Amino acid sequence: MDLNEIKEARKKAEAAVEDMTDVSLKEKAFEVILNKLLSVTQKEIVEYKQPSPTEKIINIPPNKNIIGKTGTESVLKLFQTEFGKTPKTLSEVDAALRERTLFYSKQLIQYALVQLVRNGMLRRLREKEIYKYVLA
């Protein structure tokens, strides 16, 4: 925020309270209005922060119900959301399920992924020595 923006915010705050007669009320109102004007300007210039890998994993709206009757069904429902549009590793699937308070062992998740691949619901991609899964 540069000096001109601060001066402009000050002028707006002064104009907003110029008709007030009570001095203490006028000072408090000026302070509140100026703080509000400055905070709005600061929010607009906040730099974009690149999300961490964990934040990327859990980019599913909370209202999406992914709880299934079985672990395999829960994994399938997870992949049917935005999560399943890009390839994910076993660890990423595990982290996403845990974030949604679905605690399954990695063996069960791996079994579910293999079953879903065999049934044609997921595709398995190999990158070097790591398998990634994506919605078919």
Image (cartoon, grey):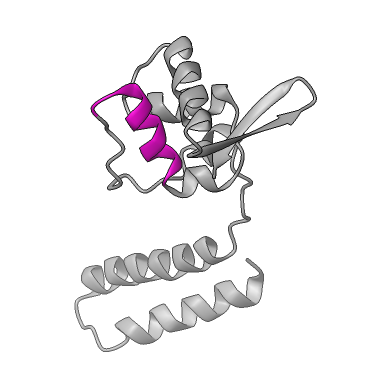
Q: Nearer the viewer, residue 73 or 13?
A: 73
Q: Nearer the viewer, residue 117 or 56?
A: 117
Residue 104 drawn above or below residue 118? above
Residue drawn 50% across the image and 28% down it = 93
79 in magenta: yes
Q: Looking at this rendering, what residue extends furthest in the right direction? A: 128
Q: Main secondary structure of the magenta part?
A: helix
Residue 51 drawn above or below residue 9? above
Q: Report the quarter where the C terminus lies.
A: top right
Quarter assignment of residue 4: bottom right
Which residues are drawn in magenta? 69-80
Q: Nearer the viewer, residue 130 or 36?
A: 130
Q: Is residue 106 left or right of residue 6?
A: left
67 in magenta: no
Residue 25 drawn above or below residue 16? above
Expressed as whole percent of the image width and height from the top left, the position of residue 123 reads 59, 37
Residue 57 drawn above or below residue 112? below
Residue drawn 54% across the image and 32% down it = 54
